């Protein structure tokens, strides 16, 4: 991996991840790691997130999402390569956004 390389990962987290502060926790953790992207609840009870940044920071974030905040329970996390064009869904001027439920 070359210096300055950016990767994009798209995840869907299932379990007890709504109503436990999961989105706010993801937002805080992503900002601390300097990542771009978004997080949102989905109507099926899951949480979806997109992370873009240095490969190591993105990998750490995905690993952290497998645990989540203290009140969460994450039995399943789907991960795949993300489409950088999805970053356009962020709110204008924000590096990382909490988006409305999809």
Image (cartoon, grey):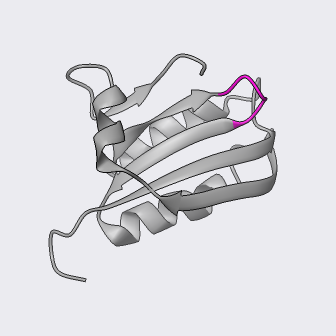
Q: Quadrant of residue 50?
A: top left
Identify the image quadrant of the C terminus. Answer: top right
Residue lying at the far top of the rendered structure: 100
Is 68 situated above or below 86?
A: below
Q: Residue at x 59, y 60 (%)?
A: 79
Tally of numbered tags: 0
Q: Residue at x 50, y 58 (%)?
A: 61
Q: Position of residue 80 (x, y in %)?
A: 53, 61
Is 10 in front, or is 34?
10
Q: Residue at x 56, y 28 (%)?
A: 40
Asked if residue 70 lies in the magenta stretch, the reply is: no
Is 38 in front, or is 31?
38
Q: Residue at x 27, y 35 (%)?
A: 95
Identify the image quadrant of the N terminus. Answer: bottom left
Asked if residue 43 lies in the magenta stretch, the reply is: yes
Q: Position of residue 59 (x, y in %)?
A: 47, 67
Decide whether the magenta segment is chiefly helix, strand or loop: loop
Q: Position of residue 52 (x, y in %)?
A: 34, 52
Residue range corresponding to the magenta coloring = 42-46
């Amino acid at each position: 991996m070359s210096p300055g390389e950016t990767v994009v990962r798209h995840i869907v987290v299932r379990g007890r991840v709504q109503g436990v502060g999961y989105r706010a926790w993801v937002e805080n953790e992503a900002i601390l790691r300097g990542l771009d992207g978004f997080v949102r609840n989905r109507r099926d009870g899951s949480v979806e997130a997109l992370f873009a940044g240095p490969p190591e920071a993105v990998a750490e974030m995905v690993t952290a999402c497998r645990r989540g905040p203290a009140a969460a329970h994450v039995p399943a996390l789907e991960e795949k390569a993300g489409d950088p064009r999805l970053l356009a869904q962020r709110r204008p001027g924000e590096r990382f956004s909490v988006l409305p439920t999809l």
